[in-house]
Image (cartoon, coloured by chain):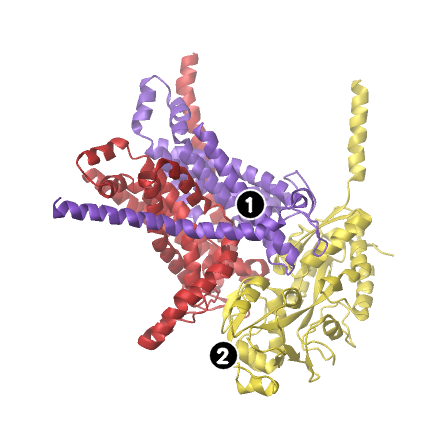
Amino acid sequence: MNANLRRRYLRDWLMQGLVFLGTAVVLVPLLFILYYVLVQGIGALSPAFFTRPPAPPGEGGGGMLPAIVGSLVVDSLALVLAAVFGIAAGVLLAEYPDHPLNPLLRLVVDVMAGLPAILMGLVAFVVVVKPLGHFSGLSGAVALALLMIPIVTRATEGVLKLIPWELTEAGLALGLPRWRVILSLVLPAARGGILTGLMLALARGAGEAAPLLFTAFGNPYLTFNPLEPMDTLPLKLYVYAISPYEDWHRQAWGAALLLAAAIMAASFLARRTLRR
Amino acid sequence: MPEWIYRRLGDRLFATLVAVLGLGVVGAALLITVVLYQGSAEAFRTFGFFGFLTSSVWDAVRGVFGAWPPLLGTLITASLALLLAFFPALAAAIFVVEMAPRWLREPVAYLVDLLAALPSVVYGLWGIFVLVPLVRAHLELPLFTWAAARAPLLVPLLGPPTGIGLLSATLVLALMIVPYASSLARDALALVPQSQREAMFALGATRWEVVRRVVIPYARAGIFSGVVLALARALGETMAVTMLIGNAVNLPYTVFGPAATMASLIANEFTEADTDLHLSALVAVGFVLLLLSLLTNLAATWVLHRLSRKEVRR
Amino acid sequence: MGKRFFLLLGLALLGTAVARPVQLNGAGATFPYPLYAKYFSVYHRLTGVRVNYQSIGSGGGVRQLFAQTVHFGASDAPLSDAKVAEFQKKFGTDPVHIPTALGAVAVIYNLPGVKAPIRFSGKVLSGIFLGRIRTWNDPQIAKLNPDLKLPPLPITVVHRSDGSGTTYIFTEYLSKVSPAWKEKVGFGKSVAWPAGLGGKGNEGVAGLVRQTPGAVGYAELIYALQNKIPFGAVKNRAGRFVTPSLESVKAAAVLEAFPADTRVSLTDTPAPEGYPITSMTWILVYRDMKANRAVRNRAEAEALAKLLWWVVHDGQQYNEPLHYARLPGVAVQVTERNLRTLTYGGAPLLR
């Protein structure tokens, strides 16, 4: 083995070590945080936590039922909105590269991604709450969707662009029209990346409390109607975490754990169904 | 004629639908701009646009507002966090796509994405109770005592080693933006055609050489998109930074000492601002953040443009 | 069959319309949120009236009251004269302040080895928060605490970074007792702090104070009590060193001349037993509720008036178990008078 080759192997070995180290640098704090959330939150998860409305401090036995239902409703609405607009915008950017709207679209999407969530709440307040005259789960969903759209669009565009052009050519050669090629060949081939984007977006939206303060507002009474004020988990987490009471703190950690676990489960299931 | 409907009309309808939805996104962005601009009009009228940008006094009691300190704080934290996050994020993507044994790929990718799934409040709480004491005891105090003994000139630059401040906030921010950079990089790497790698291996290249010479250059655009997304996230991240940065709107900032970002300032004062001018100044900070985001993205577009031009030339 | 179906449907709809419980929405201060959660939960059990109160911050609460998206707002600071005038001009009626509880701001610290409560005076507190008194063994602190052995530790000042009623009360107190503070910083929910670290929320401040030896900060008394954080005694106007407690806080509000609109500052109280950094927290409503678009009918207005009456009477028993001080009799009497002036379209709501 000559010196040059040995140097190359050494370098290969070293760089692989660095890659490994870099990965560890990312994963170790994550495990640290997950462990922390688990330890703090596990004690709060009781049947009452899932089935009861909240209770005042000192009474005990309260739960998160309205917040769990509210989160499900608000987040799914937001996800649907973000998916429809976000994926469509991504398709436009990647599959119709010459569309006159594109330079502007790409720019505004990236700019939107850099805005703090609380401003999206402000916009939803002006656009939805003010005209309706009252707070609603729907306005919260609009605020979250504004947060999520850039992530979905970016992910969709990124993945679609990386789908080999040969796939589209093959489809067109088979005599399929453009729209069928996109819907039946390109998007399915890209579904993994799009799904990652949707899950990232969901994770981002589902954990935000600030834009919900003056949109979804909160509600200690169970409701399924998105036109009424609705409770959500991050809002409850936030409000309980800043309270002075021990039993509310515990529930805040329970909410954090539930939130993280739900998003973990959602993205896990999504990946599983994809692989089938 | 059904064939005609299926083809021509179908194509046209689909393109229109996609364009209308895309237009909806543009419309939403314009709406945001208009709402923010209207909200900030009073502050800009009072202080002037450049006066507002360059003044470094933020005093709600006297009703004097300048955006320079939080603007600087955002620039520092976001760029440092990006610098810190880039290599680990890329490493995690390379590990998953190029090096990990098959059974380990999915779990590691999943775990990295999970970083994005944790609410930002949780990062903040974890930061206060776990990270800050660690940073103070094992990073700031040793550095500070070393500087005090050996390099007294550095002391005013370092600032008080309390654990709360720029450094801790930046560390947590870096961790939070890793999944955004990493997941797009991963997708980009995964879509590099296998034939490219095989050709390189056939030439006798080592694994690292394949990654360095073929895979990364091929996936460059995707990696860069991830970086832009991560930067955007870093600019706007609010809750965790607010809990860790110490929130001092006074210049000068120090490495360990407290600072403020635009997002943290808005989060701190938005719900309690009671004069119209104060509220308007906060919305104006949001508008400045929008402009900053716009500028960084224009710069990114330009870079991306150059990246792809180089590709053509080669 | 069809007829009967529609009849049943109609009855069912009518039933839901009649049985639909009154729901009142309120928004505002975070400080009384736990107490209001308790009040409204008990009140729901007693009367079936649903009250949805959300703590979006006092400033937010006032803004929502102006935007008429809520039945009532809640604030830790009374409306300023300018705001009251704006309200009257906009809506043709007054805002009514209904006090519900008293709170105090405790001076919390982390000083290892010091057991007895440290004594502070207004002058020393302002010196510390201005960044002029920098170590714990400073002669000015030592003079107030001759029995304590104070270490030569540097003082780390910790303050709230988010706009808050707590900051308002604390800085308003400092402005009253220290001309230097008034001139250099002034008071408000967010001020330009000359020194120190900013923590978000009570838990942020408490977390920083707990973790930093030599730290001093301020937090709601409830927070210090519930989380067992040491806090100091503060010299009041009568010259006594008073530790904050439910009694000393309530004592601060026993004033000879209690103003009719209850908009009164209790800091630096003249009451000899009173703790000097004390304040009330208020619920805000429209005097003529018809002027508020959120109040849809007389039934809602009546329900709100009855709720407020209950809060300042029977509701008060829930204050102390949660570490909020009760309203003294004089405040209740004034508030009763104010509640009787509430109207809907000119017709009084309470008899």
Q: Is residue B309 above or below residue C264?
A: above
Residue A235 visible in this rendered orientation of the protein: no
Q: Identify the residue at image location x=24%, y=35%.
A: B197
Residue B288: percent from left, percent from top: 43, 56
Q: Quadrant of residue C149?
A: bottom right
Q: Identify the residue at image location x=57%, y=63%.
A: C163
Mark 2 highlights which residue? C153
Number of numbered discs overlaid on the protein picture: 2
Q: Identify the residue at image location x=29%, y=35%.
A: B192
Q: Of the numbered discs in the image, which one, if any, rests on residue A259?
A: 1
Tags 1 and 2 on a common chain: no
Q: Could you tell me which secondary element the residue under label 2 belongs to?
A: loop
Which chain shows up in yellow?
A: C
Q: Amino acid at mark 1?
A: Leu
Q: Is residue A263 left or right of residue A153?
A: right
Residue B8: percent from left, percent from top: 39, 19
Residue C312: percent from left, percent from top: 79, 61
Residue placed farthest to the front in the image?
A1
Q: Is residue B311 above or below residue B261?
A: above
Q: Could you tell me which secondary element the residue under label 1 belongs to?
A: helix
**Rendering colour (chain B):** red
Residue A260: percent from left, percent from top: 53, 45
